Amino acid sequence: MKNTAIPNFFVVGAAKAGTTSLYYYLKQHPNIYLSPIKETHYFSTDIAVAEFSETYKKHTFLDLDSYFSEKPYKELALSFVQKKEHYKKLFEECKNEKAIGECSPSYLFSKEAPQNIYNHNPKAKIIISLRNPISRSFSHYLMALRIGQTSLSFKKAFEKDMASTNKGWGKTELFYELSMYSEQITRFVELFPEEQIKFILFEDLVKNTATIIKECHQFLDIKPLDTLEIEKHNAASIPKYKKINHFFVKTGIKNASGKILGEVRKEKIKKLVFDDKKIPKIKEEDKAFLLELYKEDILKTQKIINKDLSAWLQN
C-alpha cells in the first residue's frame, strides 16, 4: 500500500472567518499540500451526520465511496469524512511538500476535535482564524439566507436559532454559539504548545492579505511566495426573493433543477436570482443587541490570544 503523508497543520476556523480564503491562498504555495476536500471535518467525532437537517445534507457531499472511486480526486468544498481509510486517501497524492494540511471550521466548535488532532499528530501546527463575532454571526445569517435555511429577518432568525432545544452542527445554525470563542480556543491552547498555534484575525486577512499569508508561510517553516494571487472567495450574495428561495430549498425544487439545468444555465439563473451588489448591512440596534451578548467573551478571548480586540467592542 502507498505510504500516506500525515497532516502536520490544520486551519480550524471559526466558520465564516476566512478559512476558504486561507485554503486557496495557502494552496498556491508549491511546498504546501492541502486535502482536495477542503472541509473534511474528520476529527469532529462528536458531530452526528445522521442528525443533519435535510437542507444541510443537500449542501454537503456525503457519497464518499463514489468520490474515492475515481482518481485524481476532484476538489470538493464540504464533506464529512468518517472512515480512516478515506481520510488517508486524501493525502496519498502528497509528494515532497513540507507543509501538509486541511481546513475544517468545525474543529474549533467540536469538543472532541482538538484531542483527536493531538492524538493524530501532537506536533501539528494549528492556525485559528477568528472574526468579530457580530460580523461573523451576520455573515453566517447571509449565508443561511442564500442557501434557503431561513427567510426571516436577522434578529428573528438569530433568536429562533438561539431558542432551539436540539442544537448541533448541521442541525441548527448556531449563529450565537459559533461566535463564542474563548472556551473553544482554550481547548487547543491547553493541548498544544504556544509555538504551535497561530491566531489570525479575519479583518487583518482582508486588509493585509499578502502580509498575513507570508506570516502563515513563516509559521509553517516554508519560504514565503514572492507573489500571491489575491481574489475574493466565498463572497456574499443574497436571494432577491427570500421566501421563494426558502420554499424552493425546502421542497427540493432548487436541488433538482440544479442537476437538470447543468452548470452554464445554473450560473445564468444564479445571476437572475441572487444579488451580490446590494448586500444588506446589520442594523445598529441588532449590533447593540449582539454586543451585549458577546462583550464578556470578547474580553476573555483577547486575554487568551494576546491581541487587541477593542475594535470588536465598538458599537
Image (tube, rainbow, N blue to C red):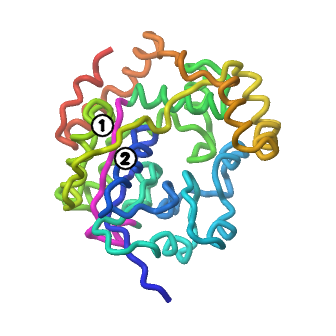
Instruction: Name the quadrant containing residue 188.
Output: bottom left
126 part of magenta stretch:
yes
| Pick the front one: 148 or 68 | 68
Residue at the spot 28% in from the left edge and 30% down from the top edge? 207
Position in image of residue 239 (x %, y %): 65, 24
List the residue tagged with mark 2: 22
Tell me which segment is drawn in magenta: 117-132
Q: Are marks 1 and 2 in contact (CB under 8 Å)?
A: yes
Which residue type carries mark 2? Leu
The kind of residue tagged 1 is Leu
Q: Nearer the viewer, residue 123 or 165?
A: 123
Q: Mark 1 points at which residue?
A: 205
Please say if 106 is above or below 89. above
Residue at 50% over, 89% down: 1
Quadrant of the rendered structure where residue 118 is? Answer: bottom left
Q: Position of residue 295 (x, y in %)?
A: 32, 26
At 42% from the left and 16% from the top, the residue drawn is 287
Above or below, 131 against 116 in this view is: above
The image position of residue 283, as x and y in percent, is 47, 12
Picture coordinates of residue 53 (x, y %)? 69, 45
Q: In this view, does 99 lie above or below 166?
A: below
Please give the name of the residue rendered at 63% of the width and 51% of the height, measured from the top-left corner.
60
